[in-house]
Amino acid sequence: MKIWQWLGYLGLAPFVIWLFFPWLITSRWDISAEQGFIFYSVIILSFLSGTLWRKDTLAPNACSQLASNAFCLFAYLCLFIPVNFSIIILPFGYLGLLITEYSLCHNKEQAFSSQYFKMRIFLTLLISLLHSIAFIRGFS
């Protein structure tokens, strides 16, 4: 397994910790599990959005940079709305970003193989599932 794959899957760990083992962190800092989960989700969505800047060489216009900024602002705004709404809409940001990334890169660059997009689909689905569990549980 390549390093980018390890890092991709290891990136799920904080989601799982905030959702299933929040006492590991909340006992040390004055932050709720809901806040930690949302903060981490916003950080990851913003980080992934930033990768679109690299794809600017693939798109002849500023489409990828505008999309990157739009996804970052979307994630940022999720910090200011009620937690239950953030938990519901953040997965749509991940899905939209995946679709945008795929449309910008599909068959244009060898570095983004089908293996990469399979991993991104799998991780997007897992993150969406974790958000769904968080919403259903209500972090209670």
Image: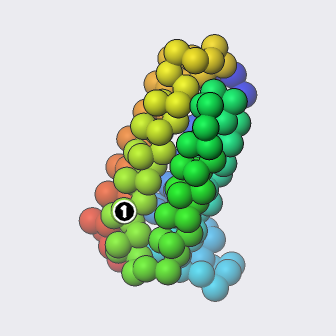
Residue on which disc 1 sits: 89
- Give the camera-side residue of 7 and 17: 7
Work out whether 106 lies above or below 94.
Answer: above
Q: What residue is at 38 percent from the left and 41 percent from the top?
A: 125
Residue 25 picture quarter: bottom right
Question: How far across and how far down the image is residue 54, in percent?
Answer: 70, 36
Q: Say if residue 83 shows up in the picture.
A: yes
Work out whether 13 lies above or below 104.
Answer: below
Work out whether 53 lies above or below 25.
Answer: above
Q: What residue is at 47 percent from the left and 39 percent from the top?
A: 100
Q: Quadrant of the C terminus?
A: bottom left
Residue at the limit of the structure toward the bottom, as seen here: 30
Q: What residue is at 56 percent from the left and 43 percent from the top?
A: 63
Question: How far across and how far down the image is residue 117, in percent?
Answer: 50, 26
Q: Say if residue 122 shows up in the picture.
A: no
Amino acid under disc 1:
Ile
Residue 109 picture quarter: top right
Residue at the limit of the structure toward the left, as seen here: 136
Q: Count the marks.
A: 1
Mark 1 surroundings within 10 Å by alpha-carbon count, few (fewer than 14), some (14 through 19), many (20 or more): some
Q: Quadrant of the N terminus?
A: top right
